[in-house]
Amino acid sequence: MRIVAALGGNALLQRGEHPDAVVQQHHVHEAGRSLAELALAGHEVVITHGNGPQIGLLAVESETDPALSAPYPLDVLGAQTQGMIGTLLARELAGRLPGRAVTALVTHTEVDPGDPAFGLPDKFIGGRLTEEQARSMERERGWSCARDGERLRRVVPSPLPREIVEVPAIRALLATGTVVIAAGGGGVPVVRNPDTGLLRGVEAVVDKDRTAALLAERLDADALLILTDVTHVFRGFGTLRPRPVTSATPEQLRGLDLPAGSMRPKAEAVAEFVEHTGRPAAIGPLDDALGTLLGTTGTTCRTAPEAAKPEPGALPTTPSARGRAEAHPAV
């Protein structure tokens, strides 16, 4: 099978952690085992990932660097995060898959220059800010900030992905048996000149889950996996008795009351892939990618109504299970 696996932000940094290289290397090491299991099971694997904390960090560094006359634009910073995260993943997987080629590919995602998202920034990047810090950044640097939990974070435009430029190259690499890391951070956002065909970068960060769904569709993938830090999508999240949803149709998944800034875009991406292709998709734990594919964990989305009956059981009351459910907003 051809699998596209999208890693949540927890693949590299968890909420509240310092963005040090050693912290991110540790998380990649932990994720590597789960991802390698997909390849070792004989599947073609394409991996994509988020970059919100990383691009936010680079943006701050760029804006405060006295050697620069102007900060680097977000599209260039996005490419930098693809290289940084891509090399960590590639090295980890190469060590776990001896004899198997692993390649990280800088990938560009076409967006519509008229997308209304450019006037409504809502994509979180960077770390959490106090009210005072956020207002200072808005005054001094022209940032837009919005509340993410108890703190505020910078928000930037997040237009919908239209096409992925490097799809032919990814197909060619898969044909050689290569594990491909692509479209990191949703891909470098670009617009194409309709007359010349030339590409130009834009100030945005494309949602990585939406791009993962489009990538899986364009590659004719057999399944899309969105891997994060919870075991399932939960019905009644935020209540005293959240219930794991083991399977759902796209319509049922969209009908759940899910957090807009975290699980909602994942559910939308999964539902969209299933509707467009008729093939399954799943949201599951990062530490069990193969189990998510096989349906032994996670929430599987299919078109078949008989396969979409959410489990009525309540969430286990162990501290670890409760902690993973409460992590819903952080994915």
Image (cartoon, helix red, strand yellow):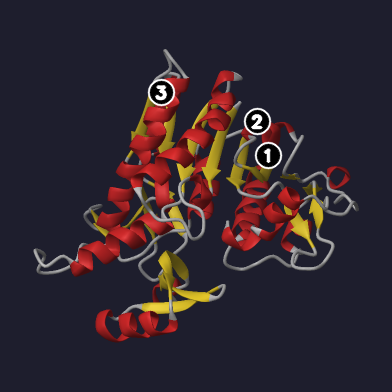
Could you tell me the amino acid type at mark 2? Leu
Task: Please say whether residue 178 is visible from this viewpoint.
Answer: no
Residue lying furthest top: 99
The quarter in which the N terminus is drawn is top right
Query: Can you say whether 217 is above or below 3 in the image?
Result: below
Label 2, label 1: how far apart the Cα atoms are: 17 Å
Query: Can you say whether 199 is above or below 87 in the image?
Result: below
Q: Which mark is residue 279?
A: 1
Q: Which mark is residue 195?
A: none
Mark in the foreground, 3 or 1? 3
Q: Residue sitting at 62 percent across and 35 percent down?
A: 289
Residue 51 in the image, given as x and y percentages of width and height: 41, 53
In this view, the residue in front, 6 or 215, is: 6
Which element type, helix, strand or loop, lies under badge 3? helix
Which residue in the structure is indicated by mark 3? 94
Q: Which quadrant of the figure has residue 39?
A: top right
Q: Residue sitting at 29 percent across and 81 percent down?
A: 142
Q: Residue sitting at 50 percent across and 45 percent down?
A: 11
Residue 202 lies left or right of residue 297; in this view the side is: left
Question: Of marks 3 and 1, which one's residue comes earlier in the chain?
Answer: 3
Question: Of marks 2 and 1, which one's residue comes earlier in the chain?
Answer: 1
Q: Residue sitting at 80 percent across and 64 percent down?
A: 236
Residues packed near mark 1 inside 10 Å, few (<14), some (14 to 19) or many (20 plus)? some
Label 3, label 2: how far apart the Cα atoms are: 18 Å
